[in-house]
Image (cartoon, rainbow, N blue to C red):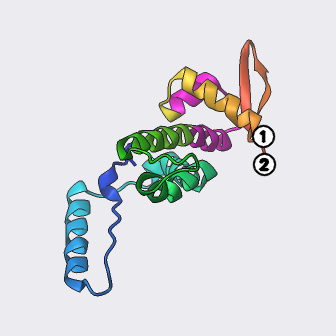
Amino acid sequence: MDLSGIGHHRLQLRWVSSAEGKLFADYVGDVTDTITGLGKFDVAAHRLPLAAIRRTLETPRVRWLTGMEKELVEHKNVYGEKIDPSRYQDVLHGAITHEYNKSLVLVSLAETEGQEVRQLAEKTGLDLLTVSNCLVELEKIGLAELEGYEGQHPKFIRTAA
């Protein structure tokens, strides 16, 4: 949520037992106060980041890492090693950042046919190198391809895959 510019305060997850009604009510009050304090959320202004967040959360890499956190941090991996929680969070954050950037480029490609790297960088707010690297990865997995050139500038499209 912070990567997207939306902010992590707009989304909260709490585990509460059905026997903890008072605690649940307190959490709902806290979240309501927080959201109210942040003001109205403009969905249209955050359309691309929201689509990228959704796609990021659906990627196998992020799903696997989040699903395995407890196992890898509290127990041991296949090599018999227990992973330090802060190291795990660094790995998870890096993976989420990478997948979010790739998703942001992909959803931006879907909006307009034939976009140059510079256009994608302006639309996404990512630097040129990050956009270029994302396009290479998206091409490798068949989600983007080179459409052609405008002068010396390559133009990319999202594929149907």
Q: Kindly identify which residue carries mark 2.
A: 161
In the rendered image, which quarter is residue 3 located in? Answer: top left
Give the mark nearer the N terminus: 2 vs 1: 1
Q: Residue at image x 39%, y 44%?
A: 84
Q: Position of residue 37 (x, y in %)?
A: 20, 58
Residue 68 locus on image (x, y percent): 52, 56
Are the residues flagged by discs 2 and 1 in contact, CB closer than 8 Å? yes
* Above or below: residue 13 compared with residue 137: below
- Residue assigned mark 1: 142
Q: Is residue 77 visible?
A: yes
Start and end of the magenta stretch? 102-123
Which amino acid type corresponds to the residue marked 2 in the rendered image?
Ala
> What's the distance in space between the residues labelled 2 and 1, CA to CA?
6 Å
Q: Residue at x 32, y 81 (%)?
A: 17
Crowd rating for badge 2 (residues with CA inside 10 Å; few <14, some 14–19, many 20+): few
Residue situated in front as seen by the camera: 5 or 47: 5
What residue appears at the point 56 percent right and 21 percent down from the top-left corner?
A: 129
Q: Secondary structure at mark 1?
A: loop
Q: Looking at numbered disc 1 in the image, what kind of residue is underneath it? A: Gly
